């Protein structure tokens, strides 16, 4: 009887540990827009680097966590795809949603091929899924 009292809590602790290790962790949840993506995403001009604009962009934007931009492209990370969707829809054709990220095209002269390249790059960066 004494062995069962010790065995049951140990078994329960092992089961909880095993189940929690199976939990899905979104690799994109902590991906930083400033340095988490290839530089091609920003269509950088000579001697340009993307800048952290989180303080100004996220100030009044529901669910906004981080933002970075170049003169051509802004990339914004949200706490959920739903908040990202709300923002992307508010921007219309000048934006593209990729899960919890929104690409905002600041330079409307970016070609369709340029947009496609940016969108594929963002879509495929840290896009592991539990499926």
Image: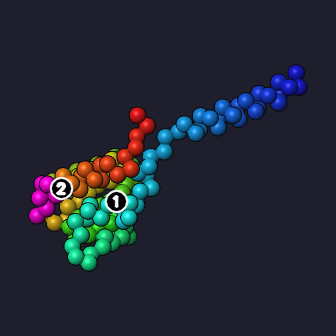
Instruction: Name the residue at 59% across, 34% down.
Output: 19
Q: Residues within 10 Å of mark 2 (few under 14, many from 20)?
A: some
Q: Quadrant of residue 10?
A: top right
Q: Magenta segment: does it hold 111?
A: yes
Instruction: Report the number of numbered marks.
Output: 2
Instruction: Name the residue at 37% across, 55% down.
Output: 78
Q: Quadrant of the N terminus?
A: top right
Colour convention: rainbow
User: Is 47 left, or right, of 22 in this rendering?
Assistant: left
Q: Residues within 10 Å of mark 1 (few under 14, many from 20)?
A: some
Residue, disc 1: 37
Check disc 2 and report its element: helix, strand or loop.
Answer: helix
Check disc 1 and report its element: helix, strand or loop.
Answer: loop
For the residues bearing labels 1 and 2, Cβ distance under 8 angstroms:
no
Q: Quadrant of residue 7?
A: top right
Instruction: Name the residue at 36% across, 57% down.
Output: 77
Q: Where does the image place residue 84, in percent across and percent down from the top left?
A: 32, 51
Compared with residue 15, is residue 67 higher up or lower down, i.e. above or below?
A: below
Q: Where does the image place residue 11, in percent across and percent down from the top left?
A: 73, 30
User: Is 75 left, or right, of 28 in this rendering?
Assistant: left
Instruction: Name the residue at 33% across, 66% down.
Output: 68
Whether residue 59 is visible here, answered yes or no, is no
Q: Magenta segment: does it hold 23?
A: no
Give me the C-alpha separation between circle 1 and circle 2.
15 Å
Q: Which mark is residue 6?
A: none
Q: Where does the image place residue 119, in percent across and percent down from the top left?
A: 24, 52
Q: Quadrant of the C terminus?
A: top left
Compared with residue 72, is residue 95 higher up or lower down, i.e. above or below?
A: above
Whether residue 44 is visible here, answered yes or no, is yes
What range is drawn magenta here? 109-115
Residue, disc 2: 115
């Amino acid at each position: 009887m004494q062995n069962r009292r010790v065995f049951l809590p140990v078994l329960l602790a092992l089961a909880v540990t095993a189940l929690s290790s199976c939990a899905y962790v979104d690799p994109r949840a902590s991906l930083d827009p400033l340095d988490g993506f290839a530089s091609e995403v920003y269509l950088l001009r000579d001697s340009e680097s993307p800048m952290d604009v989180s303080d100004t962009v996220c100030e009044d934007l529901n669910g906004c966590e981080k933002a970075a931009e170049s003169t051509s492209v802004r990339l914004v990370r949200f706490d959920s795809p739903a908040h990202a969707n709300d923002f992307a829809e508010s921007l219309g054709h000048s934006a593209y949603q990729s899960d919890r990220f929104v690409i905002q095209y600041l330079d409307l002269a970016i070609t369709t091929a340029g947009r496609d390249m940016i969108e594929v790059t963002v879509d495929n960066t840290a896009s592991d899924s539990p499926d």
